[in-house]
Amino acid sequence: MIREAKTRPAPPELSRYIVSYSCADFSGIDSGLSQTNKCLPTGMAELIFHLNDIRCFSAESGKTSSLIFPRAYLVGVMEDPVFWRIPENGRMFSVRIKPEYIKLILGVNISETRNTFTDIGLLPDRSLVTLSDKLAECSHFNEMCILFDGFLKKRLSDAADPDDYLISALEDIRLSGGKKKITRVSEDNYICKRQLERRFITEIGYSPKAYSKIIRFSSVIETIQRKAVFDDWHEFIHIHGYSDQAHFIKDFRTFAGSTPGGFRA
C-alpha cells in the first residue's frame, strides 16, 4: 500500500505543458508486496521514475507471469486500466504531461505510445537517463520538482513552441470535461471536423470523440473521489454528459474494468 504520497500542481509558468508532480513511497503487506494498484485513464501522458532498484510489475488478473516495468518510462494516453504492484520500500516520482507537448519535450510521437509505455532508456535522447539518475539522488520531493522544472525549462528554451488549432481543441475538450460536441470544437477552432479528426488520430492516436470519452470518464472519477455518496445518480450521470445509465455503465466498464458500484466499493 502507499505509505506516503505527495502531489503538487505544475508551477504557473509550466502549467501549459504539465499538470502535476507526484511522489509515492510504498510499504508491503503480508507478502512484502503492495496491494494491487489500479491506474485509470486520464487523457494525459505520464513520465514515471523509480527512485531506487525496486520496480513495480504488472498484476493483471489471470496472468501467470508479470511484466517488470523499466527504471523510467513514458506512459502513453491510456484507454485501459493498468493493474500493478510494487515490493516494499519502492519509491516513485511521476510527472503528468499534456499529450500534445510530448513531442516537443521528449521528441516522441505520442500516438505511437497509445495504451502502452516506452522505456526512456531506448530513446535517442540520453538526457532523460541522466535526469533519472539525478532524481534518484534527491532526498526530498521538492528537490525532484525543482530538478524537473529546470530540465523542462531548458528543453523548452531550445524548441519552437507550437500554437495551433490542435492544442486549442484539446484544451476545449478538457475544459468541458469531455462534454463538448466535436462539431462545436471544430467550429470554435475554425477547422473542419474531418481535418480535426485526421490530425487527432495522426498526432494523439485517438479520434476527438474517443479522446473526449476518456476525458469525460476522468472527470467522473475526480467527482467520485471528491464525494463518496450521491443523492441522485441520474442527475450525476446527466451532469457528466451521458445520455442514460446504460451509456454511463458501458463507458465506465470500458475504462475502469468494473461497474461504478464495484469501483466505489
Image: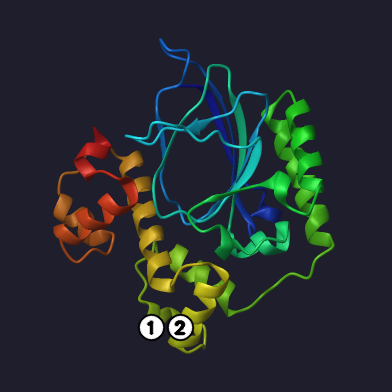
Tell me: residue 5, above or below residue 72: above
Question: Splitting the image into 4 quarters, where does residue 79 fall?
Answer: bottom left
Q: Which mark is residue 183?
A: 1
Q: Amino acid at mark 2?
A: Ser
**Is residue 220 toward the left or the right of residue 27 in the image?**
left
Q: Secondary structure at mark 2?
A: helix
Mark 2 crowdedness (10 Å alpha carbons): few <14, some 14-19, many ≥20: many
Question: Label 2 belongs to which residue?
Answer: 186
Locate the C terminus and report the quarter of the image it occupies: top left
Q: Position of residue 32 (x, y in %)?
A: 48, 13
Residue 171 or residue 50, whichever sits in front: 50
Q: Is residue 151 above or below residue 137?
A: below
Give the number of the disc on residue 254: none
Quadrant of image for the N terminus = top left
Question: Is residue 264 shown above or below 96?
Answer: above
Rendered location of residue 239, percent (x, y): 25, 60
Q: Are marks 2 and 1 in contact (CB under 8 Å)?
A: yes
Query: Who's the residue at 79% across and 33% down the image?
Result: 134
Residue at 46 percent of width and 53 percent of height? 78
Of helix, strand and loop, which one carries label 1? helix
- Give the residue at x 58% y 22%: 90
Q: How many marks?
A: 2
Horizontal and vertical percent position of residue 127: 81, 47
- In the image, what residue type sits under mark 1? Thr
Q: CA distance from mark 2 to mark 1?
A: 5 Å
Which residue: 66% across, 39% down?
A: 72
What x and y, as percent, mark residue 73? 63, 44
Residue farthest toward the top in the current orientation of the protein: 30
Task: State the colouring used for the structure image.
Answer: rainbow
